[in-house]
C-alpha cells in the first residue's frame, strides 16, 4: 500500500536496500514521478 498522503516503500533484499519515503504530496508521492525518481536516485540509474 502506498498510503493516502504520498507514502511509498521498497525492499530489495538481494541488493540490501530498504527505502521509505514519507511525503505530503498525495498522489504524486504515491504514484507520480517522485517514487520513480527516488528509485533511480537510490540505484544510480
Image (cartoon, grey):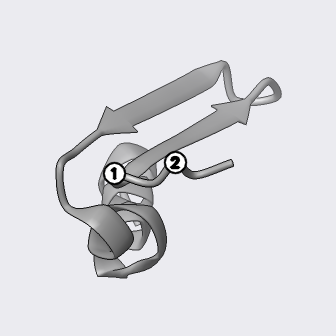
The residue furthest right is 14
Q: 38 above or below 42?
A: below
**Is residue 30 rendered to the left or right of residue 18?**
left
- Rounded to the nearest angstrom, the CA distance separating label 2 from label 1 is 6 Å
Q: Residue 38 placed where, x, y %?
A: 33, 56
The residue furthest front is 4
Q: 33 above or below 42?
A: below
> In the structure shown, which secondary structural element does the residue marked by tag 2 occupy?
loop
Crowding at label 2, few (<14), some or many (≥20) Cα neighbours within 10 Å?
some
The residue furthest left is 24
Q: Residue 40 placed where, x, y %?
A: 39, 63
Crowding at label 1, few (<14), some or many (≥20) Cα neighbours within 10 Å?
some
Which quarter of the rendered picture does the C terminus lie within? bottom left
Residue at 33 percent across and 80 percent down: it is 33
Dots 2, 1 in contact, CB < 8 A:
yes
Q: Quadrant for residue 16, please give it.
A: top right
Residue at 45 percent across and 54 percent down: it is 4
**Is residue 14 rendered to the left or right of residue 43?**
right
Q: Residue 21 placed where, x, y %?
A: 35, 37
Which residue was labeled with disc 2? 3
Camera-side residue of 26 and 33 = 26
Q: Residue 17 placed where, x, y %?
A: 58, 25
Per the rendering, the mark at residue 5 is 1
Camera-side residue of 20 and 44 = 20
**Is residue 25 rendered to the left or right of residue 30?**
left
Q: 8 above or below 16?
A: below
Q: Quadrant for residue 32, please give it.
A: bottom left
Q: Is residue 37 visible?
A: no
Q: Is residue 14 visible?
A: yes
Residue at 36 percent across and 73 percent down: it is 27
> In the structure shown, which secondary structural element does the residue marked by tag 1 occupy?
loop
Residue at 47 percent across and 31 percent down: it is 19
Amino acid at each position: 500500500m502506498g498510503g493516502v498522503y504520498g507514502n511509498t516503500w521498497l525492499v530489495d533484499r538481494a541488493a540490501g536496500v530498504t527505502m521509505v519515503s514519507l511525503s505530503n504530496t498525495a498522489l504524486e508521492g504515491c504514484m507520480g514521478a517522485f517514487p520513480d525518481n527516488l528509485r533511480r536516485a537510490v540505484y544510480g540509474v
